[in-house]
């Protein structure tokens, strides 16, 4: 029995893929590619709960809002922390995508979700997509979607290993025959790296900074492995002793040092996943290497560090931020091929 009616020339079916991420939400539309990439942030009025801004406009408000407005990230550590706000955000994004497009039929939506999502969170995703006008809603785990997005043959008996480092979680999965054979998931990702930078500057420089500044430091001078191209950066914040604004000079070696504890959690999770991988699939991974996806994979030298720690080739995708949503798009394009990876 088919998941949905087969397409024909008289009743075209429109399809939408969504990567509902802790840091960013991306939307793919059939025939157009990725049409939306917005931060998963919502600014709401405290007294009424009404949204003031969603996406990039809301992210610009982080750490800058007056008392009457709160900028929140409804997904925390890879799970939905605020079901109502998440539903509101997803509904707004989907309506934003569908508003300027003519759909002859209500669209079918495939959403990439964390592998440890609860039934309550599944219902929230399902109801928000239906509220935005979806005809059918299907979900796929993010490591599986990422593997499909980078072009791995997930439906074959060959073992494929993926490390997906997102904003809130790192998910490692060994995939074969359209299923996850061995997986490890830890609540460590890009957000945890940002928190490490905030704590480092507070302890060593008595400087208080916000999340956006910590993220900028991570992107500009953060690294996981020493390189010849060491950098410095001027960081502005508030002095914890005097209470007045001040600027300090931070070196990339210091940032690398403060990130090591968090990065070692990722290394440990990769080792754990390799330990529970069946021997036959492990031999495939030795031959093929490990694919790294997700925004966290962009930390300089992380692939080199993991390669040194595991002794296996690490391949970072050219566009790691979009792997999951690209995978959702490929599933929609070849629905019969990837039927086994979907959950209603």
Image (tube, rainbow, N blue to C red):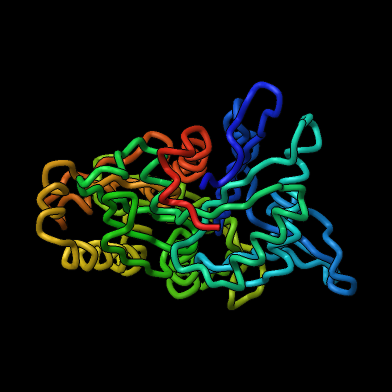
Rendered residue at 70%/50% (across/down): 55
Rendered residue at 51%/47% (across/down): 1
- Front-lying residue, 195 or 31: 31
Q: In which quadrant of the rendered view does residue 183 lie?
A: bottom left
Q: Residue furthest right?
A: 48
Rendered residue at 58%/34% (across/down): 6
Q: In which quadrant of the rendered view does residue 69 lie?
A: bottom right
Count of labels shown? 0
Q: Position of residue 308 (x, y in %)?
A: 15, 52
Q: Is residue 113 above or below residue 159?
A: below
Give the left or right position of residue 99, taking residue 175 as reference. Answer: right
Rendered residue at 38%/59% (across/down): 255
Q: Position of residue 262 (x, y in %)?
A: 35, 67
**Residue 101 in sight from this viewpoint:** yes
Q: Residue furthest top?
A: 9
- Front-lying residue, 44 or 30: 30
**Residue 32 in sight from this viewpoint:** no
Give the left or right position of residue 99, taking residue 253 as reference. Answer: right
Q: Is residue 7 above or below residue 66?
A: above
Q: In which quadrant of the rendered view does residue 70 lie?
A: bottom right
Q: Is residue 134 above or below residue 167?
A: above
Q: Residue furthest front?
A: 1
Q: Position of residue 245 (x, y in %)?
A: 65, 64
Q: Position of residue 165 (x, y in %)?
A: 40, 55
């Amino acid at each position: 029995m088919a998941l949905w009616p087969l397409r024909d020339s008289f009743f075209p079916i429109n399809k939408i893929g969504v990567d509902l991420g802790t840091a960013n939400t991306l939307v793919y539309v059939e025939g157009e590619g990725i049409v939306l990439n917005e931060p998963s942030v919502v600014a709401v009025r405290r007294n009424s709960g009404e949204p003031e801004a969603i996406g990039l406009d809301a992210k610009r408000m982080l750490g800058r809002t007056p008392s009457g407005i709160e900028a929140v990230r409804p997904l925390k550590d890879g799970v939905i922390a605020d079901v109502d706000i998440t539903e509101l955000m997803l509904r707004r994004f989907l309506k934003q995508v569908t508003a300027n497009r003519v759909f002859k039929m209500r669209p079918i939506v495939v959403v990439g979700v964390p592998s440890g999502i609860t039934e309550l969170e599944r219902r929230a995703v399902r109801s928000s997509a239906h509220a935005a006008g979806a005809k059918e809603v299907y979900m796929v785990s993010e490591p599986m979607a990422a593997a499909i997005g980078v072009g791995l043959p997930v439906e074959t008996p060959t073992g494929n290993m993926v490390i997906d480092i997102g904003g809130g979680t790192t998910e490692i999965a060994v995939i074969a025959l359209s299923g996850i054979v061995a997986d490890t998931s830890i609540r460590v990702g890009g957000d945890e790296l940002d928190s490490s930078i905030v704590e480092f500057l507070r302890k060593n420089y008595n400087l208080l900074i916000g999340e956006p500044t910590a993220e900028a430091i991570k992107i500009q001078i953060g690294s996981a492995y020493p390189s010849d191209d060491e950098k410095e950066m001027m960081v502005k914040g508030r002095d914890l002793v005097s209470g007045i604004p001040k600027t300090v000079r931070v070196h990339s070696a210091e940032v690398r040092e403060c990130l090591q504890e968090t990065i070692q959690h990722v290394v440990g999770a990769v080792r754990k996943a390799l330990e529970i991988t069946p021997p036959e699939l492990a031999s495939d991974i030795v031959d093929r290497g490990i694919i790294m996806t997700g925004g966290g994979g962009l930390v300089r030298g992380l692939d080199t560090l993991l390669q040194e720690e595991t002794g296996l080739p690490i391949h970072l995708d050219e566009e790691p931020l979009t792997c999951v949503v690209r995978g959702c798009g490929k599933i929609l394009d070849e629905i019969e091929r990837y039927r086994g990876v979907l959950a209603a």
